[in-house]
Image (cartoon, rainbow, N blue to C red):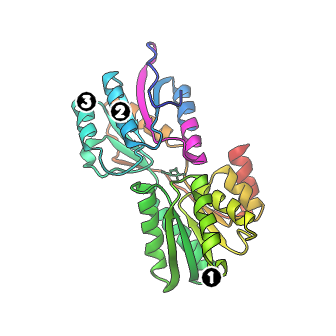
Amino acid sequence: MLMGIPVTAQEDAPLTIGFAQIGSESEWRIAFTEATLAEAEARGINLLFSDGENNQDIQIAALRSFIEQGVDAIILAPVVETGWNQVLEEIKDAGIPLVIIDRNITADPSMYMTRVASDFVHEGRLAAAWLAQQTAGDCTIIELEGTIGSSAARDRQTGFNELIELFPNMTIILSQSGNFTRDGGYEIMETILITENMDLICAIWSHNDDMAIGAIEAMKEYGVDPGDDIFIVSVDAIPDIFLAMMAGDTNATVELSPYMAAPAFSAIEAHLAGETVPSLIPVLGNLYLPDTAAEEYERRAG
Ligand code: AHR
């Protein structure tokens, strides 16, 4: 099922929706996929699922396949922001309602029906505000970036940078992409541990929890005490980051809800019933700290 090619439609399903997912690069992404499949099943929606393997070409091929199969609607979680205009025209010409979910695209909003998304800029600001408070605005930071060209990486960076600009002694000395993966976070951190003087580094700001967890593993191997010698703040609020918090290995995470399918499906159903749907359906998230890590872990993993 989790392949690049969509599965074939069931004939008796009331509504057939194509979902072009980005891939399975992170624990958050896998939770988002599972929640979407479960929500579709609960609503009796026939969901044609495509795993884009973090590749825009695969995602575009999936979208064209959905058009050919004559789906009732399409949901696109775009890996990168640009390069969608041609296929969006094709979807529009076919008269298929389109929902952009999670990450954003640079296209005229008239090209899609609605967008279900969190505010990535706000997530970056929340992470930076927490760090500024912890360090009294004095901190040398290493940034683990998400996928280059994705709105999640760009906007989180924008929000974080906007806020630390208020504090002259908060500086990012190194910024590198780990592509939102655990291995990516590990590899970047390992190089830093070998080449940099860790005594000069105050914090790791990671665009997602998985890269932070990879960095934590590397630090432990090299005798650095994560969460203690170095502050760590990241985004997603996945179960594993709460385990790391419970172990004292990380300090803060900003939540990104994986439950975006319900509002997306409801918007499609409303649109097909002739109702007006707002152009943006926001998904909210909070900052989580070690004091609630155990209960958050139970709530999310239990
Ligand atoms: O687009 C959202 C980001 O994508 C999540 O923060 C990250 O874990 C995922 O890979």
Q: Amino acid type of disc 1?
A: Leu
Residue 8, disc:
none
Against 269, residue 239 (above or below) is below
Magenta stretch: includes residue 32: yes
Q: What residue lies at 34% left-to-right and 50% top-to-bottom?
A: 105
Residue 95, disc:
3
Q: What residue lies at 38% left-to-right and 31% top-to-bottom?
A: 62
Q: Amino acid type of disc 3?
A: Gly
Point out the residue furthest to the right here.
Answer: 247
Q: Is residue 131 visible?
A: yes
Q: Mark 2 or mark 3, which has the lower sequence index?
A: 2
Residue 195, x across and y down, in percent: 60, 73
Secondary element type, mark 3:
loop
Quote the CA–CA distance across marks 2 and 3: 18 Å
Front residue (pair 4, 46)? 4
Span highlighted in magenta in the image? 12-34
Quote the CA–CA distance across marks 3 and 1: 57 Å
Q: Quadrant of residue 144?
A: bottom right
Q: What residue lies at 49% left-to-right and 57% top-to-bottom?
A: 146
Q: Mark 1 or mark 2, which has the lower sequence index?
A: 2
Q: Is the residue at mark 3 in contact range of ligand 1, meaning its CB lies under 8 Å from it? A: no
**Circles 3 and 1: CB distance less than 8 Å?**
no
Q: Name the residue under label 2.
A: 61
Q: Which of marks 2 and 3 is in front?
A: 2
Q: Residues within 10 Å of mark 1 (few under 14, many from 20)?
A: few
Q: Name the residue under label 1.
A: 200
Locate residue 69 relative to residue 182 in the image: left or right: left
